[in-house]
Amino acid sequence: MPATSLLFKRLLDKSVQRVKLEAGIDIGIIEDELGFTLGRHGRSYVQYLRKGHLPTEKDLEALTCWLVSRQGLDKQGCEQFLRSAKHSAPKHFTDQLFPSPAPMIKHKPADLSSPYLYGPPITKPYLFFGRERELTRIFNCWQRPYMEHVAIIGPHRSGKSSLLHYLPKITRAPLDQVRPGQKTDWLPRPEEVTWVMVDFCDVRMQQLGYLLRYLQTELGLPVLASYTLADFMEAAVHHTWTRPCLVLIDEVEAALSAPDLPPALWDSMRSLVSYHTNGLLAFAITSRKALHKLSTRRGQTSLFFNMFHAVALNALTESEAMELIHCAGLPFTDEDARWIVEQSACWPCLIQQLCQTYDEALRGNLALHDWREEALQRLTLNRHLLQLRTVSTPQRL
């Protein structure tokens, strides 16, 4: 392969990875979007380019514009990317995409004007509060010479998915994505870590072939002849593992009930991390069930789930709850704040919804004197949330 083609491949792979980290979507979706942008059906042409083949200048410009728009290329990287693919005027085209230099900003404060989110997982680091004890325990498991595995166990709506998204993002978050004083130095060399997110609520991940192809791509394994478990293990066992790889699995119960994912998958993963990866591959999973309940599936026992350190996701501490309540600077009285703590039992999703109701009242969308009554009515309509208030958790100060 010519040197310029090899450089183009490396820069394209790097840019795609940056888009993946920024947007939180998998490589397959990125390739689909790129294929559509380039006027192709499917991702095959993008995969062709990712092998080092050079595009036409028209395709190169469309590809570059898309990567810049999705923050996969900065100005310096853009010109280098164009040169690697032999663009006729790389500097001129780069100047068109970046018409003026960005102002030098040492620290842009995170936007906390609307911090109370109810429903989707928290994916912005500056909107994530608390969990210092849990984070310390998790990252300690990953700083040992032989990385260990973590199971985040908690009831429905306790914040498991938000915590899972937070783990990779906080280690690489720029200053404008964190609050003043928010800890980011959880890992000594975060740039060396490969993060792989697997969400088993995505039905595609419940298909063995798709899952193995996804893992092969994200982990940087050689391309497989076929996507069987035996072929995947053959490639993984003979792969040279040189950097830490952390596979984050959300909603593992959905995987255990998927008919296309055999028990041999989990046993193979245990064998892989135990004997073939030099301690450089580790898993983190989320589950509502205790580990001893996960270890049995369809009457069969999997030793995969016996490897994990269980991290219980309880309610926030009272000080963490107060930080979340007051983060937006809303004029809560001490009585209001104490009432929210009591009604929420310090569970973050309940705090979010109660504070959201108060915020609406301040903006004139509700009668301010009725906000507590309205907030309780909303909690009552979401009865599954009220179950959190009955979960017995130790008081942490």
Image (cartoon, helix red, strand yellow):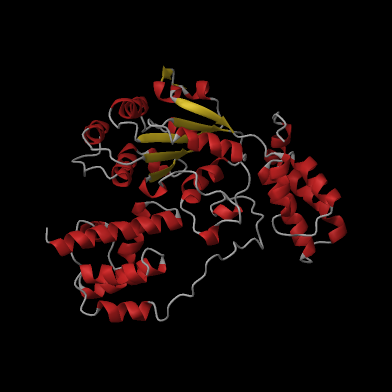
Q: Residue at x 59, y 33 (%)?
A: 154
The residue at the far right in this view is: 369
Q: Residue at 31% across / 43% down in the picture? A: 219
Quadrant where the C terminus is found in the figure: top right
Q: Is residue 335 left or right of residue 209?
A: right
Residue in front for this viewpoint, 324 or 118? 324
Please state the horizontal and vertical placement of residue 32, each as a whole percent of the image: 34, 58
* Above or below: residue 276 compared with residue 378: above
* Relative to 361, 289 lies left or right: left
Figure label count: 0
Residue at screen point 49% across, 55% down:
173
Give percent across and percent down for residue 240: 23, 38
Residue 291 position within the rendered picture, expressed as x and y whole percent measured from the top left:
51, 24
Residue 230 vs 339, above or below: the answer is: above
Q: Is residue 122 visible?
A: yes
In the foreground, 190 or 115: 190
| Residue 245 in which image quadrant | top left
Residue at 28% in and 78% down: 91
Inspect this view and state whether residue 257 appears. no
Q: Is residue 216 left or right of residue 377?
A: left
Q: Residue furthest left?
A: 1
| Quadrant location, the N terminus | bottom left
Q: Is residue 325 left or right of residue 304?
A: right
| Residue 60 image position (x, y, % from top left) | 26, 71
